[in-house]
Image: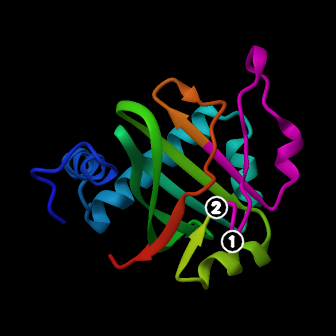
Amino acid sequence: MQCVGEKWSVKAYFCIFLLLVSSISSAASKEEIDARVDSALARFYEEVEFGRSLAAKSEGILVFPRVVKAGFGVGGEFGEGALLVGGEKVAYYNTASASIGFQLGAQARTQIVLFMTADELERFRYTDSWEVGVDGSVALIELGVGGDINSSSLKEPIIGFVLNNKGLMYNLTLEGSKITKISK
């Protein structure tokens, strides 16, 4: 793709976005992902009061310890993580999404997805790529007004949590995120 010499088109914004993302995130080794996943889970258990007990009830836990979102007109996010089943890392994945609109800057966050039923976990594991909102709906647990957690979503078959450096985040969506299995 040639980026030089073009007007500020979507293609030019996309080129700038690619440069931003490539400078912020690079493919991690299996050992680096494992260490980050372990750290992210420990933080999740510490910060989300019922996180450990909910994870114990789940069939599988998909952890993306560091999802970087960057944008300059055109934006996107990327992260790598692992799927844990029975406490063991059984596969590695990346997540990616793109967006268009006013945005400038970069941020990082942790995403944790709990598969609460065996059917949903199997449906996820045996597809080449899985898109949130298309292949499965993720009930995002949000921090509400006054710090309350939307507990009605805890009964859904797939539950998601997003944390930043201040804790559980609110008013977010994982819709449109594409999750793809990778070799590590």
Point out the image quarter for the C terminus. Answer: bottom left
Q: Nearer the viewer, residue 54 or 21?
A: 21
Image quadrant assignment for residue 62: bottom right
The label shown at residue 132 is 2
Residue receiving disc 1: 135
Please indicate whether residue 137 sits to the left or right of residue 181 in the image.
right
Whether residue 114 appears in magenta in the rendering, the answer is: no
Residue shown at 74%/60% (left/top)? 137
Relative image position of residue 164 (x, y in whole percent) = 49, 32
Which residues lie in the magenta part? 133-161
Q: Amino acid at mark 2?
A: Val
Q: Secondary structure at mark 2?
A: loop
Residue at left offset 82%, top offset 34%: 150
Residue 7 image offset from top left, x and y in percent? 21, 45
Three-letter residue code for mark 1: Asp
> For the point 26% across and 62% down, which residue is it?
27
Q: Is residue 135 visible?
A: yes
Q: Alpha-carbon distance for marks 1 and 2?
A: 6 Å
Residue 165, quarter of picture: top left
